[in-house]
Image (cartoon, helix red, strand yellow):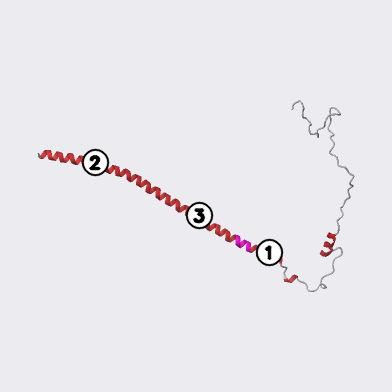
Amino acid sequence: MDFLSIAVFLAGAVIGAGICYAFIAGTRSESKVERQMRELQEEFTAYRENVNQHFNKTAQLVNNLTDNYIAMQKHLEDAAVSFSEPPKSFTLEKTESLPAAKPGFVSLEERQKLELRPKTSDAEFEESVSVEPPKDYAPKSKPGDKGQLSEDFGLDSKAI
């Protein structure tokens, strides 16, 4: 009996080990799925962080662009104001201190008066001059043929 109980014990141990191995193998396959799930979760988290960094950098660059645009606009406004005002050194109190005008010089006031006068054209054209289309001097086989400047030149009415 001793031998039989040892054989039954060993057979039970082998069967138990087989069942345990099969159960652990099933658990191992689940752990592969869990590992893949964890890796995908980590990849997704890294991707989301990259997208957040991208949008933060884009927002920062747009803000810098807006600030530079405002600074440029202010600079142009300041320049326009400073250039539109003549310097104080150009103001004259007396016109007697000016040198005499050169002969042939036309002042601004006189030029404006001349521009207000009705303008005469340099050349007078008569109303009776008629405008004619260009003449076709290309050689023709018959005097009644149409020339090369005719709209239907080279078109056969038979082919159409």
Say whether marks 3 and 1 touch (CB < 8 Å). no
* Residue at the image position 60 percent from the left and 62 percent from the top: 70
Horizontal relation, residue 64 to residue 12: left or right: right
Q: Which residue is mark 2?
A: 19
Q: Which mark is residue 55?
A: 3
- Which disc, if any, is residue 11? none
User: x, y percentage for residue 65?
Assistant: 57, 58
Is 85 left, or right, of 69 in this rendering? right
Q: Sequence-wise, which precedes: disc 3 or disc 2?
A: 2
Q: Earlier in the sequence, mark 3 or mark 1?
A: 3
Of all residues, the one furthest to the top in this rendering is: 158
The question of residue 70 being in magenta is answered with yes
Q: How many marks?
A: 3
Question: What residue does disc 1 label?
Answer: 80
Callout 1: SS = helix
Tell me the quadrant of the picture where the N terminus can be found.
top left
Around disc 2, counting alpha carbons within 10 Å, would you say few (fewer than 14), some (14 to 19), or many (20 or more)? few
Mark 1 to mark 2: distance in Å? Answer: 91 Å
Q: Secondary structure at mark 3?
A: helix
Name the spot of residue 32 as percent of width and height, x first: 34, 44
**Residue 155 percent location from the top left of the image:** 77, 29
> Which residue is found at the position 26% from the left and 41% from the top?
22
Which stretch did the figure color magenta? 69-74
State the residue at coordinates (27%, 43%).
Answer: 24
Q: Sequence-wise, which precedes: disc 1 or disc 2?
A: 2
Instruction: Say what amino acid the circle numbered 1 marks.
Output: Ala
* Rendered location of residue 150, percent (x, y): 81, 33
Question: Would residue 40 appear left or right of 132 to someone viewing this image?
Answer: left
Check disc 2 and report its element: helix, strand or loop: helix
- Neighbour tally class for label 3: few under 14, some 14-19, many 20 plus, Cα within 10 Å: few
Amino acid of disc 3: Phe
Mark 2 belongs to which amino acid?
A: Ile
